[in-house]
Amino acid sequence: MTGAPYDAIARWYDELVRSAPLYEEMILPAMLELAGDVAGKQVLDVACGQGMVSRALAQRGARVTGADISTKLLDLAQRYENETPLGIRYVHDDAQTLATFEDAAFDGATCGMALMNVDDLDAAARSIRRVLKPGGWFVAAITHPCYQTPASEWVEDERGPARLVRGYFNEGYWESADADSVRGKVGEHHRTLSTYINTFARAGLLAERLSEPAATGRRAAEVPGNLEAPSILVVRWALR
Ligand SMILES: C[S@@+](CC[C@H](N)C(=O)[O-])C[C@H]1O[C@@H](n2cnc3c(N)ncnc32)[C@H](O)[C@@H]1O
């Protein structure tokens, strides 16, 4: 991935985030639960996009900085901040370097649905580790690497809906054939679960809790297969 592909789909992505139940019903609650009590904490929201996770953290009392490479999504985030000030600072920065920030500047960091978009996961893991204070934590939501492989699909038989998984071991960048999906518009990297866990371990961050939210509410009605297999994995990493 080169440049900031989300610039081209910023408005479309903003609409999706605000309307799709996946974010409100599954991603945000799981991330906030694993982040724990953030009141008064300095938190960096890596690849913050239009600021959905940043605002949720700030509403719980965190002092939030959001960083992203998409100028258009940062503009939208800043517009929401201007409309309803929560004290969030937004900066243009790359997750692979986080060059704006001093070492050990944050109590915690978050990253909502974006590690799959980052080309160099090793570099991002090292940067995130660098900006965390001793005892720091990192909570990230990703498309579930075990069930959301490029060749996987929802199927249905007499036992009901199920997820058929193929190509789990084929890591690499891919674009979905569904032109009306995020992965159809900008694509993403498929990586195995062990790649995620081992990459962060190499950087000094150990996985300490996982969440695999099952669908509820509107999402369960729209994607009944999500009652059988998860689409999202949320991981809390801790500095060792
Ligand atoms: C699916 S969006 C998620 C945005 C936001 N966290 C959310 O949950 O709505 C992926 C985001 O990753 C950002 N991104 C991709 N590569 C990045 C990088 N190397 N550094 C910072 N942001 C990046 C994109 O610009 C986009 O905002």
Image (spheres, rainbow, N blue to C red):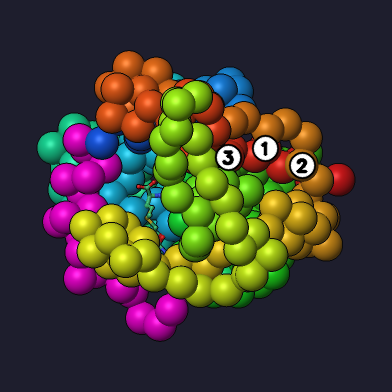
Q: Quadrant of the N terminus?
A: bottom left
Q: Secondary structure at mark 3?
A: strand
Residue 110 is drawn in which quadrant?
top right
Total tally of numbered discs in the picture? 3
Instruction: State the residue at coordinates (76%, 42%).
Output: 207
Where is residue 123 drawn, in percent x and y?
A: 65, 71
| Whether residue 217 is situated above or below residue 117 in the rendered picture | above
The quadrant in which the C terminus is found is top right
Q: Which of pointers 3 and 1 indicates the residue nearer the eye?
A: 3
Camera-nearest residue between 189 and 110: 189
The kind of secondary structure element at disc 1 is strand
Q: Which amino acid type is marked by label 3?
A: Leu
Is residue 224 located in the magenta-colored stretch of the structure? no
CB contact under 8 Å: marks 3 and 1:
no
Tag 2 and tag 1, C-beta contact below 8 Å: yes
Q: Which residues are magenta?
A: 1-19
The residue beneath circle 1 is 236
Cα distance in 3D space between marks 3 and 1 = 10 Å
Which residue sits at x=24%, y=69%? 7
Report x, y in % for residue 148: 51, 51
Badge nearest the viewer, 2 or 3: 3
Q: Is residue 158 left or right of residue 133?
A: left
In the picture of the structure, the residue carrying the numbered disc 3 is 233
Quadrant position of ligand 1: bottom left
